[in-house]
Amino acid sequence: MDKQLKEKLSGIKLFICDIDGVLTDGALIKSTSGEEMRSFNVLDGVGFVMLRLLKLNIKTAWITGRESETTTLRAKELQIDDIYNGVIRKIDAYSELKKKYSVSDNEICFVGDDIIDIPILEKVGFAVTVPNAPKYIANYVHYTTTLVGGEGAVREVIDMLIESRGDYTAHLDKLIEELR
């Protein structure tokens, strides 16, 4: 990891993600009864567990424009600190989180992929998007993941956050010991 990237990431205290197109591939499956289902990538989920187990002092939050019980259930499973479901003006949720955790913009990483994410992408210390986002989103970010949304893109960012905190291999060894 280059020095400038490590500097930006090492001060992150709050990690916020959008859902559709970031933690999922953006597809929505609706049953005839109206039930909505989504597909979350397990690698991303394990990444959130890794952040929690390593105790790196990074809070987690999800802010999504769509109201979804599936998203709420997945957030609870992963013990995400805060979930904002069905929020179109995401900047309001962002402001609440900043206040709640007493963090500044440069201490926040946000992964987003669409127009409603731009107000947050413009503010954070480390703004990230995915390659499947509309092309203009790249104008608002510091980094674009190599993996697409719903296929491990968030895990890619989590691995970078962990690596920014020191010896990545030592962190992994610590996790492996806890799992033995």
Image (cartoon, grey):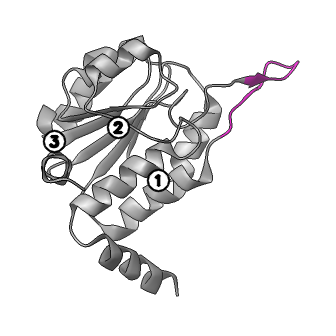
**Secondary structure beneath disc 2?**
strand
Left or right for 64, reference 1: right
Asked whether 16 falls inside the magenta stretch, the response is no
Position of 47 relative to 146 (above/below)? below
- At x 43% / y 50%, what residue is drawn? 156
Give x and y (percent) for residue 102.
Answer: 13, 40
Dot placed on the residue nearer the N-terminal end, 3 or 2: 2
Circle nearer the viewer, 1 or 3: 3
Left or right for 134, reference 119: right
Give x and y (percent) for residue 46.
Answer: 52, 59
Position of 54 relative to 1 (above/below)? below
Circle nearer the viewer, 2 or 1: 2
Q: Residues within 10 Å of mark 1 (few under 14, many from 20)?
A: some
Q: Which amino acid is tagged 1? A: Gln
- At x 20% / y 30%, what residue is drawn? 124
Q: Residues within 10 Å of mark 2 (few under 14, many from 20)?
A: many
Dot placed on the residue nearer the N-terminal end, 1 or 3: 1
Q: For residue 175, which quarter of the picture?
A: bottom left
Q: Which amino acid is tagged 3? A: Glu
- At x 36% / y 12%, what residue is drawn? 89
**Secondary structure beneath disc 3?**
helix
Q: Which amino acid is tagged 2? A: Ile
Q: Which residue is mark 3?
A: 107
Q: Which residue is mark 1?
A: 79
- Look at the image and give the residue range highlighted in magenta: 29-39
Q: Which residue is mark 2?
A: 16
Label 3 to label 2, Cα distance in Å? 11 Å
- Of the pair 167 and 19, the residue shown nearer to us: 167
Position of 67 relative to 98 (above/below)? above
Q: Main secondary structure of the magenta part?
A: loop
Q: Residues within 10 Å of mark 3 (few under 14, many from 20)?
A: many
